Image (spheres, rainbow, N blue to C red):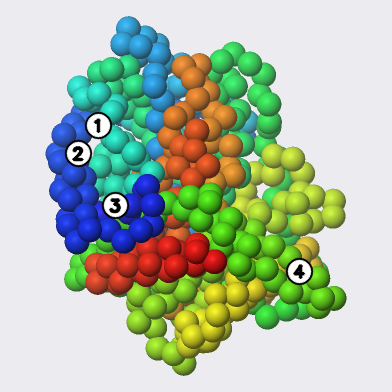
């Protein structure tokens, strides 16, 4: 990938010593050299019995975010002698889970109408068995994003030229000498969002423990079909102009991205929230959510770090789970993208020169605007304009994975002790939990090297400053 890897400070956001970034970089490089992963077997796991074969239609919300999300789940494992049994259990239960979640075993295609759909071929999910003679402790704290190391633990699709060539799901199971196990999962976001993925993993782990599935997929995506006739009731600046060509703000061949993570501790966030009460129209005040405060903080720092011109519009798009927004809510187990996007926008000058409360209020109001009416309008807007989420240029996207139930997943050898992204797509910011036992939240993103240096200083200085109030 040609990426440079740095780590954030995970014990506080006080000023780092001048050499800390270099020390962390060397430690990560050392860990990367130490981690030796060998592929032992690679197969396709097909559904355990015959499933639907045909074209599976996707909704408009599925069409707009053609990205790939790579995650790793780390387990202490079942001991040295039981590793082959563990892999066999994971593989066999995957085949059973694919009977219910059969679209994962198909292939993404574009129909004659120009819309993406899944051809349910039953060809299966790429499944890699890998081994490492290292102890799983060599991974260290994986909440500090390190793509060079962690991407050895997932079956990625770097050679794919388009999203259509990316499998809908891939699995890699890596067993370590100590008995530790890492399950690396790559999902094609066109088919599912994070909530749908965790529903699938919950079913998969239930079957691995010979239990009846606690959740089954609701596969009919017509519940999110456009209205007839479609009509747009709100402006939808979360989507790129129709004539904008897909592109990248940074050419990775000439200006590689630096990936880094930043840990937000509960006591600092409590102080930020107390200092950021939002006055409502009726004169009462509302304490912003933790996620709203983090989003505002990161948006400001990123805008400054990239040197976006004061008159240029900057946007923060936030992934919102639309399932509970409908009346009645979407059916339990809705399988697909239930994600709508809020759009907070203003000029870079407004964002960087107004008090912090201005940005918190902007984010809060954007999130509050995502109602059922807004989502229906967005679905119709996509129908009429065939647009993508505007995650380019001065815009960026942020998604909260910290409340997804990854830490409840148990294949039969205990719950994961850490779950983290192996990398993050360009212009996407992920908010995750640091570990099963921690209340810390971790923000991971990629930026050009110079911008990341500025971003790091801003985030540490400003959070320390604001936490004093």
Label 1 crowd bin: few (<14), some (14–19), many (20+), radius 10 Å: few
Q: Is residue 134 above or below residue 119?
A: above
- Whichever of callouts 3 and 4 sits on the residue coming sooner in the sequence is 3
Residue 225 appears in the rendering: yes
Name the side, left or right, on which 210 lies relative to 312.
Answer: right
Label 4 crowd bin: few (<14), some (14–19), many (20+), radius 10 Å: few
- Name the residue that disc number 1 marks: 138
Name the side, left or right, on which 9 lies relative to 86.
Answer: left
Image quadrant holding the N terminus, namely: bottom left
Q: Residue at x 67, y 68 (%)?
A: 277
Q: Residues under labels 1 and 4: Cα distance?
A: 48 Å
Name the side, left or right, on which 283 lies relative to 453.
Answer: right
Q: Residues under labels 3 and 2: Cα distance?
A: 13 Å
Which residue in the rendered view is the most extreme toward the front? 468
Q: Residue 24, how many percent across, how many down?
A: 22, 50
- Name the residue that disc number 3 marks: 7
Viewer-nearest residue: 125 or 265? 265
**Badge 3 vs badge 2, beta-carbon distance below 8 Å:** no
- Name the residue that disc number 2 marks: 31
- Whichever of callouts 1 and 4 sits on the residue coming sooner in the sequence is 1
- Whichever of callouts 4 and 2 sits on the residue coming sooner in the sequence is 2
């Amino acid at each position: 990938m040609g990426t440079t890897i740095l780590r954030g400070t995970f014990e506080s956001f006080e000023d780092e010593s001048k050499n800390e970034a270099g020390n962390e970089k060397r430690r990560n490089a050392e860990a990367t050299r130490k981690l030796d992963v060998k592929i032992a077997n690679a197969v396709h796991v097909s559904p355990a019995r015959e499933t639907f074969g045909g074209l599976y239609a996707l909704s408009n919300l599925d069409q707009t975010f053609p990205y790939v999300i790579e995650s790793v789940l780390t387990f202490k494992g079942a001991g040295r002698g039981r590793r082959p049994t563990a892999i066999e259990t994971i593989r066999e239960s995957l085949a059973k889970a694919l009977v219910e979640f059969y679209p994962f075993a198909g292939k993404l295609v574009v129909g004659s109408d120009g819309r993406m759909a899944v051809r349910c071929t039953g060809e299966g999910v790429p499944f890699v068995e890998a081994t490492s003679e290292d102890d799983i402790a060599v991974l260290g704290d994986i909440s500090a994003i390190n793509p060079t190391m962690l991407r050895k633990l997932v079956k990625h699709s770097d050679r794919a030229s388009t999203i259509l060539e990316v499998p809908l799901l891939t699995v890699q199971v890596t067993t370590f000498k100590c008995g530790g196990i890492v399950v690396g999962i790559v999902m094609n976001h066109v088919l599912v969002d994070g909530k749908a993925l965790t529903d699938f993993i919950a079913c998969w782990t239930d079957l691995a423990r010979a239990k009846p599935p606690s959740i089954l997929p609701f596969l009919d995506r017509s519940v999110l079909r456009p209205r007839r006739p479609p009509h747009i009731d709100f402006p939808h600046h979360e989507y790129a102009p129709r004539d904008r060509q897909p592109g990248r703000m940074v050419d990775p061949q000439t200006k590689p991205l630096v990936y880094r993570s930043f840990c937000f501790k509960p006591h600092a966030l409590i102080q930020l929230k107390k200092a950021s009460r939002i006055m409502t129209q009726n004169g009462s005040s509302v304490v912003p959510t933790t996620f709203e405060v983090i989003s505002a903080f990161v948006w400001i720092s990123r805008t400054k770090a990239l040197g976006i011109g004061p008159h240029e519009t900057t946007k923060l798009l936030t992934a919102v789970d639309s399932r509970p927004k409908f009346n009645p809510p979407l059916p339990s187990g809705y399988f697909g993208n239930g994600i709508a996007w809020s759009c907070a926008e203003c000029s870079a000058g407004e964002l960087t020169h107004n008090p912090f409360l201005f940005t918190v209020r902007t984010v809060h109001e954007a999130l509050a605007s995502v109602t059922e009416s807004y989502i229906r309008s967005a679905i119709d807007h996509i129908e009429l304009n065939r647009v993508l989420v505007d995650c380019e240029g001065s815009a960026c996207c942020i998604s909260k994975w910290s409340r997804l139930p990854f830490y409840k997943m148990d294949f039969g050898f205990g719950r994961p002790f850490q779950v983290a992204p192996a990398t993050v797509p360009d212009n996407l910011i992920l908010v995750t939990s640091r570990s099963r036992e921690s209340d810390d939240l971790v923000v991971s993103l990629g930026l050009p090297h110079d911008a990341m240096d500025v971003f790091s200083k801003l985030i540490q200085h400003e959070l320390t400053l604001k936490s004093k109030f």
